[in-house]
Structure formats: structure tokens, C-alpha cells
Amino acid sequence: MMGGTFDPIHHGHLVAASEVAAKFDLDEVVFVPTGQPWQKTSKHVSEPEHRYLMTVIATASNPNFTVSRVDVDRPGPTYTIDTLRDLKTLRPDADLFFITGADALAQILSWKDVDELWSLAHFVGVTRPGHVLDDMGREDVSLLEVPAMAISSTDCRARVGSGNPVWYLVPDGVVQYIAKYGLYAAQPGAGEPTL
Ligand code: ATP
Ligand code: MG
């Protein structure tokens, strides 16, 4: 599984998932868009339904990629422990792998009660430009170098807001979805050159 805010989903997420799936011979990668992310409550986050649908669009062409609504449908803030418990309940026989970028891995390792997470999934940390990938000496975390994609959702949102393209940073269908619903819309006048 790969959790994320996916606001919007971009090719960094998709490459990470594809690489881990190939390396660990996974049958499926389940993308899990967050409900209300507890780390990001102070920032504006797009409606869960928009983020869920963009994730569906981005993954639709890959037969091994699926999207789960467990976090979107659970009321209240999203905690990874709940996500893993729900997936385990839905697929009791599955061996769960939790795919995460270097930045998120560093956060997870610093969480309280983190030990409970290890019993539910094997963690795989992937490289991400601008972040140091460190397993802090844990044997239950695997590290994987993936092709460097210097893309973030924050940058994609800023680009849209200032009228710059996101073509080839996010899948084509996601570019069109963003335009269709006016997500990350520019303030009037933003993106126009100031003289
Ligand atoms: P934001 O800028 O809004 O935080 P983001 O690009 O970091 O967005 P998230 O939805 O926060 O995307 O990340 C979901 C997961 O994908 C995290 O584990 C994150 O580390 C990983 N990830 C995101 N972008 C990349 C990338 N370019 N390369 C590798 N991993 C990535
Ligand atoms: Mg992030």
C-alpha cells in the first residue's frame, strides 16, 4: 500500500509504487488517499473526493494498481495505524508492504507507539530528491533507490496557481481533472507578468 494526500497525485508517487512492486514482486499496490491528514490540518487540503478521483484516474491504466477508500470514508483525522488495521481486516491473508518516500519515512520513525506499526506491515522507504533516506538502523525497514523524480504536490499546486504547466509531472487525465474543477486555481491576475 501507498498512502498519501495525493493533492494531486504525480509521477513521483507512481514511479515509487511501480519500482517497489517490481522489486518486491508485489501482486498489487493499493493507493490510499488520506481523509483529513492530521499533520496538515493548518494547511488547505483539497476535498477528499477530488483527491480520491485523481488517484483513480492516475492508476486506472495499471492492472496492478488499485485505490482504497478506507481513509477517505473514515470520519476524523487519518492515522496510519487505522489504515493498516482496516486493510488487514479487508485482506486477512495479505502480506502488507507500506511504501513511503524518504521524508515520510523519517517522520514515521519518529512517531510515538511506532512499534505497533511493524507488526502490521513491512516498511519500504524509497529515495526522494532533497531528502536523506535513513532507516535509523531498523532491520524491519527496507530501503530502495528509485529513479529521482524531483516532483512534489506542493510544487504542482504552486505551478497551477501561477499559471505554469503541470503536463508530464502528473498524468494527462489529472491535468485535465485539475482544469475541469478549477483546483489550485490562480487568484485573479496571478501568473500574469508584473510590469
Ligand atoms: P506535498 O508536497 O503536498 O506534501 P507530496 O509530493 O509530498 O505532497 P504526499 O501525498 O505528501 O506527496 O506523499 C505521499 C507519499 O509519496 C509519501 O510517502 C512521500 O514521501 C512519497 N513521495 C512523494 N513524492 C515523491 C517523489 N517525488 N519521490 C519519491 N517519493 C515521493
Ligand atoms: Mg508530502
Image (cartoon, rainbow, N blue to C red):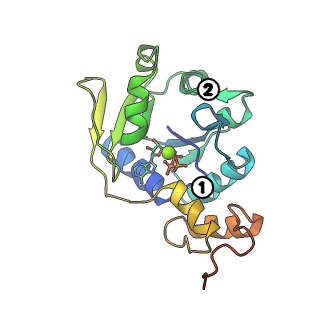
Q: Which mark is residue 186?
A: none
> In the image, is the residue at mark 1 within 8 Å of ligand 1 by its beta carbon?
no
**Among all residues in the image, which is located at the extreme left?**
137
Q: Nearer the viewer, residue 146 or 152?
A: 152
- Residue kind at label 2, given as amino acid type: Leu
Which residue is found at the position 43% from the left and 18% from the top?
114
Q: Quadrant of residue 79?
A: top right
Please state the horizontal and vertical placement of residue 141, each as a whole percent of the image: 31, 28
N-terminal-most mark, 1 or 2: 1
Give the labeled residue for mark 1.
8
Give the labeled residue for mark 2.
90
Q: Nearer the viewer, residue 163 or 127?
A: 163
Please state the horizontal and vertical placement of residue 85, each as a whole percent of the image: 57, 21
Which residue is found at the position 57% from the left and 62% from the top?
158
Q: Identify whether 186 is placed above or below 102.
A: below
Identify the secondary structure beneath mark 2.
helix
Q: On the rendered image, what quadrant is the C terminus found in?
A: bottom right
Which residue is found at the position 69% from the left and 68% from the top?
186
Residue 170 appears in the picture as rendered: yes
Badge 2 density bin: few <14, some 14–19, many ≥20, Cα 10 Å: few
What is the CA distance from the residue labelled 1 to the residue labelled 2?
26 Å
Q: Is residue 125 left or right of residue 181?
A: left
Q: Identify whether 188 is placed above or below 123.
A: below
